[in-house]
């Protein structure tokens, strides 16, 4: 398996014992993808860090998650459907339940999520994965029910710096958090149902769903689509009408409609139902999140 490397970093070779552990984890995660219909969503944990779903399916950590669930008054069989739902859809739709944290299954998920320190930065080598794996197993193994509030507070503190932008939507005030890291889960445990993430000049709008009608209401129209080109290691523009399945739709100002493909100025790229890139337009990102949240309430 080819691992991403940090420029200038020297990859630490694994001992035979460490390689055996690493290979066994890859096998467990790959087999779980087939078993639970999550193809392409678990094996990558060795590159980015274990998440709750990964913790529940690996032979070494699974008994610890079972013990954790039992301590909180539930079972792995009851926790798994919740974890799979959150793994696939994200936390925003379940923000009320995550905030209340009254259900034992929710509590078990939050404890496992606190043990998760997903990385994704270049340089997450097999040696780094094994180091993080040891920490995860230690945190799972040391849990007792009386530590739940401590673990939940620790998870919530991952939000970091946050700016709250109030928006009035049809007489209802919606406060949209703006953060600089992916803090969706910590925010959702504090009752927020969407956010805007700043990454350089880019602004990402996140919530459960941002329907096309809100984009149309903002004066936008589908302009073109983008598909990833392995040869160019980047995205290529294709026509909206002839786009293949899985292409990302890019919306443009209505004044851009009809221009040649390469001349259109993108306004919003849809990455997922509730995940949009608005490029540098922070005001648009905040407005879309606020209106989407208001529609659900």
Image (cartoon, rainbow, N blue to C red):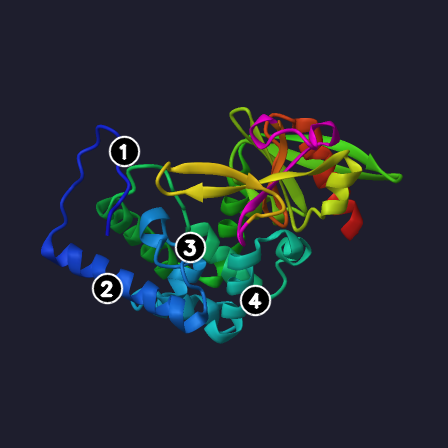
Q: Position of residue 188 (x, y in %)?
A: 62, 48
Label 4 to label 1: alpha-carbon separation: 40 Å
Q: Is 8 on the left or on the right of 146, as rendered?
A: left
The answer, for residue 147, to whether it is visible in the render is: no
Q: Position of residue 285 (x, y in %)?
A: 67, 34
Q: Is 253 within the magenta?
A: yes
Q: Earlier in the sequence, mark 2 or mark 4?
A: 2
- Kindly identify which residue carries mark 2: 24
Q: Residue at x 76, y 42 (%)?
A: 214
Tell whether 236 sits left or right of 23. right
How crowded is the residue under tag 2: few (<14 C-alpha within 10 Å), some, or many (20+)? some
Residue furthest right as drawn: 171
Q: Is residue 93 above or below residue 252?
A: below
Q: Earlier in the sequence, mark 2 or mark 3?
A: 2
Q: Are marks 4 and 1 in contact (CB under 8 Å)?
A: no
What segment carries the magenta color?
244-263
Q: Which-is-in-front pick, marks 4 and 3? A: 3
């Amino acid at each position: 398996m080819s691992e991403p490397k940090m420029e200038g970093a020297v990859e630490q070779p694994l001992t035979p014992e460490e390689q055996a552990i690493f290979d066994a984890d890859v096998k467990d995660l790959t087999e779980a993808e087939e078993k639970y219909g999550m193809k392409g969503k678990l094996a990558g944990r060795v590159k980015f860090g274990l998440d709750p779903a990964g913790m529940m399916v690996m032979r070494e950590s699974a008994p610890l998650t079972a013990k954790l669930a039992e301590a909180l008054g539930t079972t792995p069989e009851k926790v798994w459907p919740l974890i799979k739902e959150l793994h696939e859809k994200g936390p925003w739709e379940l923000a009320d339940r995550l905030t209340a944290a009254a259900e034992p299954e929710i509590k078990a998920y939050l404890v496992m999520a606190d043990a998760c320190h997903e990385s994704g930065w270049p340089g997450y080598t097999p040696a780094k994965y094994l180091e993080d794996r040891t920490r995860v197993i230690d945190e799972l193994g040391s849990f007792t029910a009386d530590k739940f509030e401590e673990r939940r507070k620790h998870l919530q503190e991952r939000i970091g710096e946050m700016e709250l932008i109030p928006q009035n939507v049809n007489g209802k005030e919606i406060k949209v958090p703006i953060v600089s890291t992916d803090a969706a889960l910590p925010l959702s445990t504090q009752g927020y149902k969407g956010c805007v993430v700043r990454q350089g000049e880019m602004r990402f709008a996140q919530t459960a769903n941002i329907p096309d009608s809100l984009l149309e209401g903002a004066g936008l129209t589908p302009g073109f689509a983008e598909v990833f080109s392995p040869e160019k290691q980047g995205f290529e523009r294709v026509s909206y009408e002839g786009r293949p399945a899985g292409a990302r739709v890019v919306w443009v100002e209505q004044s851009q409609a009809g221009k040649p493909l390469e001349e259109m100025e993108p306004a919003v790229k849809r990455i997922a139902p509730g995940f949009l890139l608005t490029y540098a337009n922070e005001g648009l990102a905040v407005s879309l999140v606020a209106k989407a949240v208001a529609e659900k309430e």
